[in-house]
Amino acid sequence: MIRAAAIAVVLGALVTGFASAAPPNAADLEAELVCPVCETTLDQSNAPVAERMKAYIRVHIAAGDTEQEIKDALVAEFGPEVLAEPPGGGFGLLAWLLPLAALVGGAVAVALLIRTWSRRAPPPEPVGAGLDPELDRLVDEELARFDS
Amino acid sequence: MASRARLLGQGVAIGLVALLFILLGWSLLNDEGGGLKSAAARGERPEAPDFTLERLDEGGDLQLSSLRGKAVVLNVWASWCIPCKDEAPFLEQVWQDNRDRDVVVVGLDAKDFRADARKFAKRFGLTFPLVYDGPGNTLDGFGVTGFPETFVIDREGRVVEAFAGAVDGDDVRPRLLVAIDRALET
């Protein structure tokens, strides 16, 4: 059992290591970077600067640069706006946290509304429960007279 | 409980609407770019937004306001822009012909690779000061919507005239030179 777990860990590490050592994919990078002129991802743009950036990516992949090195180089030229996904730290963190906060806030609001509405609805009264005893007696008398 | 929840909901809704109005007002007040060009076209001479950008032609930075006292021809360009190639020799000529008259041509390269911009400058023999704005953060302030655009700024840092498109056309060249003369008059 322990041996099997150890083999699984080693295999996992090998697969992860192989994946991180693999050269970056140009198509993936083009989908993760934004054309500074038309502000769509590079794979959606044929603007001259986007074509130049695609060529830059291909040249640097061929030169053996990692994905992060290529992204860092393009950020140094065009600023962090060139990244399709905002960075996970600093002000960029807001872009990740705000939708989450909105989702949680919305869920709380819906829960509060449901609770309010369920309390506001009056409980259904049992049939006849509210009948006046005097009226009940009169109805019985009338029914008895009708039967006789 | 229900009335408190209702009040809270109404408060949040009113707050959101108020926030949207504030954002709308802020964006209208700060929309100086398009306004700058139309104000210049009306002859109002709006103040040019100041910037400090790294220089491409040498080390260090250049601050636009440091050129107060001179007329500035600010040309926004990029190496991938075809009309920019057409007008580059004319802008160099304007610089050579007017540099002794307190006129400075400044090339603002934006949304471009630094290396490409330097190659462009070398290819066209540009000798006037060049600054670099890769992300293009300064463009909104000037209301730049395309490449190239040129702004003639007077000695007090106010925009005399804005030109969208290349300035080397037969009909535009004289207008640019007249704008430079007007910028020097102040």
Image: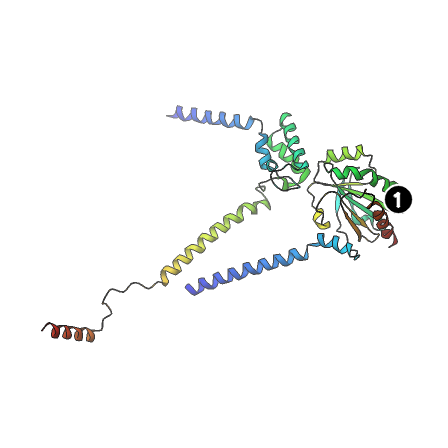
Residue at numbered disc 1: B98
Of residues A145 and A131, the one nearer the viewer is: A145
Identify which amino acid the numbered label 1 is placed on.
Asn
Considering the image in quadrants, where does the C terminus of chain B appear?
bottom right
Which sits in the foreground, B71 or B163? Answer: B163
| Outermost residue, right side | B100
The chain identifier of the residue carrying mark 1 reads: B
Residue B41 in the image, given as x and y percentages of width and height:
77, 54
Q: In the visual, does A42 lie left or right of B148?
A: left
Residue occupying image coordinates x 44% and y 62%: B5
Q: Is residue A144 left or right of residue B123?
A: left
Image point (61%, 59%), residue name? B22
Residue A21 position, x and y percent, is 56, 26
Q: Position of residue B14 (x, y in %)?
A: 53, 62
**Quadrant in the rendering for residue B124:** top right
Question: How many residues crowd around disc 1 within 10 Å: few (fewer than 14), some, or many (20 or more)?
Answer: some
